[in-house]
Amino acid sequence: MKMDKTMHTGLLAFDEDSYSLVLGLSGGLEKIDRAVDGAHLEISSWEMTGYFWQSFVNYLWPELTEQVNFDSEAGMFCAYGAELEPLEALRTEFEAVLADPGLVVDALIRGQAEGCDFY
């Protein structure tokens, strides 16, 4: 698969019924990190891990995350499934938020007010 360098995520097809949406955490998210740090949020353990992003997408898009599985790790967010459509929809929503660090901060503020524990 050819990766679009303007996107943070990659959508991988392994065969006709095995797809993965991944977000590598080795770089490219510095603006988000600075925005969250600058907002002085009281997140118990703010660290941009795959587990953090998994809880983030679960909070924002539960109707989509119910349709996929997760295999995130400390250095990578990963959602996967047999159906391409929910992963494409999740990618579209996720990319829109990742493109605007202010949207990430807003979502974290809302989540904290609602008692969401981003980990």
Image: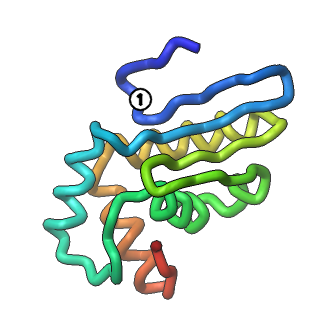
Residue in the foreground of this view, choosing between 93 and 13:
13
Relative height, residue 58 to residue 7 (above, below): below
Q: Residues within 10 Å of mark 1 (few under 14, many from 20)?
A: some
> Which residue bears the numbered disc 1?
7
Q: Amino acid at mark 1?
A: Met
Image point (34%, 83%), residue name: 44
Q: Position of residue 101 (x, y in %)?
A: 28, 52
Q: Position of residue 1 (x, y in %)?
A: 58, 14
- Drawn side of residue 7 relative to residue 102, left or right: right
Number of labelled discs? Answer: 1
Q: Residue furthest top?
A: 2
Q: Position of residue 64 (x, y in %)?
A: 70, 53
Relative height, residue 51 to residue 89 (above, below): below
Q: Quadrant of residue 96?
A: top left
The colour scheme used here is: rainbow
Q: Quadrant of residue 61?
A: bottom right
Image point (46%, 73%), residue name: 119
Q: Position of residue 48 (x, y in %)?
A: 36, 59
- Drawn side of residue 44 relative to residue 87, left or right: left
Q: Quadrant of residue 91?
A: top right
Q: Residue furthest left?
A: 38
Instruction: Give SS at disc 1.
Output: loop
Image point (85%, 29%), residue name: 17
Image point (52%, 49%), residue name: 77
Residue in the foreground of this view, choosing between 2 and 26:
26
Q: Residue furthest front?
A: 74
